Image: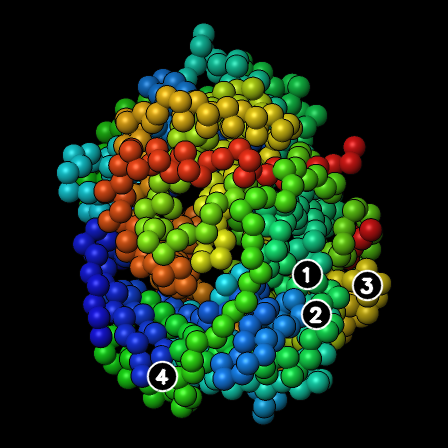
């Protein structure tokens, strides 16, 4: 495997991952810009409209047929918050040319690159704006998408907790935006916004598969759509920068009612540290607290007290937060909260062992190694590195994890405090 | 040892049946760091009435025993829990139960053989006490309630219950909160002793292995057990008819969810189930796949906002089609789909559409061979259907429009179709 980065134009990078582990090539394009209340809903409507048609393939149906013809290439797009950035993602997965049937004449690798760039950079327009019909239909779809946030109650509870913790701040925004914005969007202002976005934002193109990197760089450089777009000095938030002051935390408790069979408890923790080196002991703190099956939360909330089936935590390194989540009987709220708080205190008191630390290192390292056997995880890792403004390779990452001492985890434990306790009940 | 090679994906399957009746399958993957193993028993939630080999009388057990056993297998006599032990080794261990099998697995990058020791030890040595069985009930109750809050699970189970009158697939895999409280250690031992005999089990490995050496390692770790006779499983006779055409349930969801399901006859012994499965997948895509006329029309009329999920599920005991999605008017979606089926029956299949869909499905089948965990899961799941997963790749090449058209007439029947809806009370 080799990983190389090539700047195609200022602000536009091509990342090539040359690997022979897969039957497929995976291509991803990320457009990154700061989260912004004014434009967040526009960002969501854009990929929805782009997938409707290009100047060459003018309808969704034609695009689908083209993908099917390429032995079931699959296209997908989505929106993510990564730190204080909004990232618009596009993916195209297709068979590597080594695995297409013998009689096929296509050059699927090149076709895939051309097709994905065409969808993103060469949309169907009418009178210098998006096609009205597509924009109106997609606005309705996005409305439904935004409204569907109540459907999965676990996810809803987590989103609500984040919203409460980041009230009025960019990271508190809902990644798909807001229904009330949709009335303001039309095919003209959306196209204007798109043109600006495509010519000013950070663009990262990833291509992973058994490919000749030199050829790929040539194909991308010579792509007519790439030639059309300008150099730029992109505006985005480097993810290691702290954008909020976390000094004065008032622990909040929030309760909300919905039609649920099970109570969903989410506790948002703040990590009052932000230097690069603290991220490694904090990752290990999180594994010991609640990420693995040997963790304190799993052992005490689930195995000992039988209060929950899910009891875990996850660490959002870009925002210095840990979220604890569990599903419990509603009347067990106090009981569960008490046990969780006891686990946090134990962490602060340093009640964990060298063995706990070793186990959590093994857990993390096996996760990092596995990521290199999965095409999408590998790309996700590298875009995370790209947006953090520095590249930590897999090897360096593992080394940093291995170097963490018990004392380091004890030190970070005292910098981790409850910010918000959120409970969804009936 | 039998070796089956597939040239389309350039992979080999090594398969051996050991003296004690255990089947071992190995798919070597050179150069991949992850090693994945699954150990499965042909015992799932539907096996609740059976005759223990050597006995005369029928045994009947409460709903949810197979899943309960899966939870309890990790408990060891020395007070340790194998999930903890495996996690401490840095491997990612898990287990799950389906309608027709239960499987224990882990994925490792290091410590493969120590982890195999543990896996083979705990699956062969059950340890149930009144206390450890009692303790699990609270945890499983929360697992059941978690599913009760998932609208997509509720809408699917309602479709199943409206298709099947007697088949135990009607029962939730985990049972109900009431039924699990009837489970005790004697029931668990009885089911363990019946179904966890090597002759009822299969192991599947995928990763960088030397097959001959691996087989020896497996043999070393097996505890001697007699190759018991066949387990007689008792399933009540299931009529060909459905129970009820339509069911609606209210839950808090943003848009109605639906499952359109078509009950199929049980596969007969002479039938090629792989061929039939492929024909049904092609038909589903021709009718309502992403590139179909009908999808285009319903997308434009805002009856559908994304393509429905299409699948054909079958074992020896049940077979049905499920079309799953969201729509403001599921009844209208059903009506349109039924019209399209009738139209296809009348006009026949378009051969260029047929070829395109076939190529797409072929590509999708190749993609299944990307990841060691996906590969092992696929081989295990197909094994219990008496299918070798490679067969799909070869059958895609041979399937004809004539055969597919026959399947359309035989399977896509209006009087076998049910509609299940979950929607808001408002």
Q: Whole-Å distance between the Cαs marked 4 and 3?
A: 50 Å
Examine the rendered structure and indicate whether residue A99 appears above or below residue A312: above
Residue B107 spot, x, y in % from top left? 42, 69
Q: Do labels 4 and 2 share a chain?
A: yes
Q: What's the mark number on residue A333? A: 3
Instruction: Say which of B164 and A112 sits in front.
Output: B164
Q: Whole-Å distance between the Cαs marked 1 and 2?
A: 10 Å
Examine the rendered structure and indicate whether residue B149 appears above or below residue B99: above
Asked if labels 3 and 2 touch by Cβ distance under 8 angstroms, the answer is no
Q: Do labels 1 and 3 share a chain?
A: no
Examine the rendered structure and indicate whether residue A366 appears above or below residue B300: below
Q: Which residue lies furthest to the top in this view?
A: A127
Q: Whole-Å distance between the Cαs marked 4 and 1?
A: 36 Å
Q: Is any part of residue A357 visible from this angle?
A: no
Chain under callout 2:
B
Seen at 68% across and 28% down, the residue is A179
Element type where label 2 sits in the image: helix
The residue mark sitting in front, 4 or 3, is 4
Seen at 34% across and 51% down, the residue is B271
Q: Whole-Å distance between the Cαs marked 4 and 2?
A: 32 Å
Q: Whole-Å distance between the Cαs marked 1 and 3?
A: 18 Å
Residue A348 spot, x, y in % from top left? 70, 74
Seen at 60% across and 35% down, the residue is B326
């Amino acid at each position: 495997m080799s990983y190389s980065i090539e700047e195609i134009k200022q602000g536009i990078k091509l990342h090539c991952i040359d690997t022979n582990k897969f039957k497929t090539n995976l291509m991803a394009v990320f457009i990154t810009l700061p989260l912004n209340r004014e434009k967040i809903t526009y960002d969501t409507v854009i990929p929805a409209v782009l997938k409707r048609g290009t100047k060459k393939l003018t309808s969704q149906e034609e695009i689908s047929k083209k993908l099917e013809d390429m032995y079931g290439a699959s296209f997908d797009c989505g929106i993510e918050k990564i730190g204080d950035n909004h990232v618009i993602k596009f993916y195209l997965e297709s068979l590597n040319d080594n695995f297409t049937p013998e009689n096929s004449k296509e050059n699927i690798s090149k076709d895939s690159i051309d097709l994905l760039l065409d969808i993103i950079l060469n949309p169907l327009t009418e009178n210098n704006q998006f096609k009205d019909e597509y924009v109106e239909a997609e606005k309705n779809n996005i409305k439904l998408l935004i409204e569907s946030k109540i459907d999965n109650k676990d996810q809803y509870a987590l989103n609500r907790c984040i919203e409460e913790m980041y009230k009025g701040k960019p990271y508190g925004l809902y990644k798909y935006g807001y229904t009330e914005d949709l009335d303001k969007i039309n095919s003209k202002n959306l196209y204007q916004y798109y043109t600006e976005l495509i010519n000013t934002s950070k663009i990262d193109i990833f291509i992973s598969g058994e490919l000749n990197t030199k050829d790929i760089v040539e194909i991308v450089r010579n792509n007519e759509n790439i030639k059309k777009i300008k150099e730029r000095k992109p505006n985005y938030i480097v993810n290691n920068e702290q954008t909020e002051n976390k000094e004065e935390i008032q622990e909040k408790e929030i309760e909300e009612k919905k039609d649920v069979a099970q109570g969903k408890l989410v506790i948002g923790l703040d990590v009052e540290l932000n230097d690069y080196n603290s991220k490694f002991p904090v990752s290990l703190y999180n594994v010991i607290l609640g990420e693995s099956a040997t963790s304190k939360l799993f052992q005490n909330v689930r195995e000992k007290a039988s209060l929950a089936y899910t009891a875990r935590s996850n660490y959002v390194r870009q925002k210095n937060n840990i979220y604890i989540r569990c599903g419990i009987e509603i009347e067990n709220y106090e009981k569960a909260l008490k046990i969780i708080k006891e686990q946090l205190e134990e962490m602060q008191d340093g009640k964990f062992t060298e063995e706990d630390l070793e186990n959590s290192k093994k857990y993390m390292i096996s996760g990092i190694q596995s990521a290199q056997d999965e095409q999408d995880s590998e790309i996700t890792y590298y875009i995370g590195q790209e947006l953090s403004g520095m590249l930590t390779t897999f090897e360096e990452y593992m080394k940093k994890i291995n170097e963490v001492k018990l004392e380091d985890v004890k030190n970070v434990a005292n910098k981790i405090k409850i910010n918000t306790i959120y409970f969804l009940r009936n | 040892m039998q070796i089956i090679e597939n040239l389309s994906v350039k992979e080999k399957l090594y398969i051996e049946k050991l003296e004690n009746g255990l089947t071992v399958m190995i798919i070597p993957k050179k150069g991949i760091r992850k090693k994945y193993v699954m150990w499965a028993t042909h015992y799932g939630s539907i096996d609740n009435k059976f005759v223990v080999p050597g006995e005369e009388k029928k045994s009947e057990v409460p709903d949810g025993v197979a899943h309960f056993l899966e939870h309890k297998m990790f408990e060891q006599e020395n007070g340790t829990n194998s999930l903890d032990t495996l996690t401490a080794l840095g491997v990612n261990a898990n287990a799950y139960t389906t309608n027709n099998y239960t499987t224990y697995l882990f994925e490792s990058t290091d410590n493969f053989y120590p982890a195999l020791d543990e896996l083979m030890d705990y699956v062969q040595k059950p340890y149930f006490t009144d206390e450890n069985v009692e303790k699990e009930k609270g945890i499983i109750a929360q697992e059941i309630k978690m599913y009760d809050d998932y609208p997509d699970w509720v809408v699917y189970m309602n479709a199943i219950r409206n298709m099947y009158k007697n088949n135990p697939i009607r029962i939730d895999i985990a049972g109900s909160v009431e039924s699990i409280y009837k489970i005790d250690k004697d029931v668990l031992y009885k089911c363990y002793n019946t179904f966890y005999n090597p002759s009822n089990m299969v192991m599947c490995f995928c990763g960088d292995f030397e097959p001959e050496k691996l087989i020896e390692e497996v043999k070393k770790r097996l505890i001697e057990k007699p190759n018991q006779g066949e387990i007689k499983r008792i399933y009540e006779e299931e009529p060909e008819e459905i129970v009820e055409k339509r069911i609606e349930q209210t839950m808090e969801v943003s848009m109605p969810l639906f499952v359109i399901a078509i009950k199929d006859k049980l596969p007969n012994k002479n039938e090629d189930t792989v061929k039939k499965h492929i024909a049904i997948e092609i038909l589903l895509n021709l009718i309502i796949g992403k590139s179909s006329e009908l999808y285009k029309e319903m997308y434009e009329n805002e009856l559908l906002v994304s393509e429905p999920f299409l699948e054909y599920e079958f074992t020896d005991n049940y077979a049905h089609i499920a079309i799953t999605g969201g729509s403001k008017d599921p009844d209208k979606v059903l009506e349109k789909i039924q019209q399209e089926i009738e139209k296809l029956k009348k006009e026949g299949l378009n051969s260029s559409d047929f070829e395109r869909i076939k190529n797409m499905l072929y590509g999708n089948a190749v993609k299944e061979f990307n990841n060691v965990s996906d590969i092992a899961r696929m081989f295990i799941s197909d094994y219990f259907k008496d299918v070798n997963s490679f067969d799909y790749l070869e059958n895609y090449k041979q399937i004809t429009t004539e055969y597919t058209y026959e399947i359309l007439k035989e399977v896509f029947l209006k009087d076998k179709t049910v509609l299940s809806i979950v929607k808001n009370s408002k």
